[in-house]
Image (tube, grey):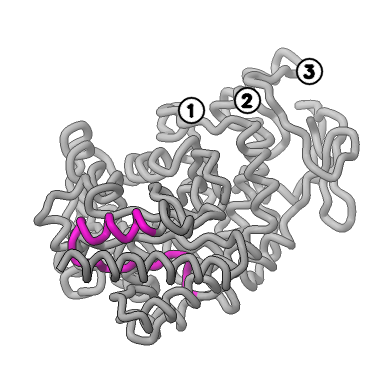
Amino acid sequence: MAETKNQQGFVFAGKKRSSTGQDGGDDFIVANKKSMLSTGLPSIWEDPAASLASARHEFGEHGGVNMSIEASATFTVMEPETMRRMFSGELGPDRDFFIYSRHFNPTVLNLGRQMAALEGTEAAYCTASGMSAISSVLLQLCSSGGHVVASRTLYGGTHALLTHFLPRACNITTTFVDINDHEMVKNAVVEGQTKVLYFESMSNPTLTVANIPDLSRIAHEKGVKVVVDNTFAPMVLSPAKLGADVVVHSISKFISGGADIIAGAVCGPANLVNSMMDLQHGALMLLGPTMNAKVAFELSERIPHLGLRMKEHCHRAMVYATKMKKLGLNVIYPGLEDHPQHELLKSMANKEYGFGGLLCIDMETEEKANRLMNHLQNCTQFGFMAVSLGYYETLMSCSGSSTSSELNDEEQALAGISPGLVRMSVGFVGTLAQKWSQFEKAFSRLQDSELYKN
């Protein structure tokens, strides 16, 4: 479906363009063929909510307020010569010419524009999973013999990718560092070999906050690209506006919000995203982690209320963390003043979104962690024992034996992951008073059982 634009920047259905016609009216998508995925945003970026509100709005083929789903795997052309011109790169999605949905799909393209607006980047491309987004970026930026400097504290799947898969399959090695030790970061960079500095804006699961501006300066002085996983902090932090080159997401988490979709995104410069879709050299194009158009449509309908959801996730996390601390629990939450990076996060965060929707409780041992979670789920229904995060219900897991189990004991110790660390993704269902009462009852039962046991 071709598109036309009115004076307000809304995009309506239009007649399919001819490849022989002159196209001077779609500068909303492309500037000199620079960005196939451009958001069309003004040059001044305010915050994620304002950016999303300023992005183009797709209407449906018949005037529906929601865009149509382009469920086609392949696309037709009006003239035979057009196909040759598309495969040569002369015509592309910037002028509404599509080849095949593993390459570009209009519905997925629209979600990419939303993700670019959310993160304040030139472009974005959405993938079938967060891990496919991460692996594709690293494979695009690093060749055989390349080197990555990465935080010691990462999602277990990412750590395994860097520790085991990339060295074995691609001859790409990684040096793991304490991301808060900037001298250690500098010393780990190998001139001419290190291509990427990789870290999470808020680490999984320890909630360590990275100093994105300083780390970006360190990397850029040495000619190294900065890739930041912002899965834990959409809306809260905007890494690209703080100096990062590329932002990756597991959209499956907060952005989806329903624990029903697996998806990812790469947000960054248009030249990088387009290179990842190159027909002969693009990691995304050739590895094929394609997002289904129906999934893209569902996600595009959830992003507009992400800001509201994040504010409530963060608000409740702050309330719970404060109350849990008063109960004598060892709570880790960046919103608490005793968190080592509390002031740093305040200085970097977008206003009014809070300090994140996750908190941790260190119960010291896995046995105690499991007893707490058992009471919270099976006695008072405070939340569910499940991995993942960003769901409207509270989700709990003991990280060392679940989402960080890819790290061995020594690696977990270096990452600061206690055997009894309970990662809690705070939901927003029910009233706050109701849910807190459920927590208190479970904790009281836990204390009684501990006394009885002793």
Q: Which residue is mark 1?
A: 279
Q: For the C terminus, give its image quadrant.
A: bottom left
Q: Residue at x 22, y 39 (%)?
A: 166
Q: Secondary structure at mark 2?
A: helix
The image shows residue 356 at horizontal and vertical percentages of 47, 69
The CA span between labels 2 and 3 is 12 Å
> Which residue is drawn at the image coordinates 40% and 38% (left, top)?
132
The reply, left or right, for residue 8 in relation to residue 172 is right
User: Which amino acid, mark 2?
Assistant: Met
Q: Residues within 10 Å of mark 1 (few under 14, many from 20)?
A: some
Q: Is residue 414 magenta?
A: no
| Sequence-wise first label, 1 or 3 | 3
Looking at the image, tell me whether mark 2 or mark 3 is earlier in sequence order.
Answer: 3
Residue with the mark numbered 2: 86
- Residue 124, percent across and down? 55, 48
> Mark 3 highlights which residue?
78
Quadrant in the rendering for residue 68:
top right
- Mark 1 is on which residue type? Leu
Residue at figure coordinates x 14%, y 62% from the top left = 413
Residue at 68% x, 36% y is 107
Residue in the foreground of this view, choosing between 386 and 10: 386
Magenta-drawn segment: 355-375
How many labels were placed on the picture? 3
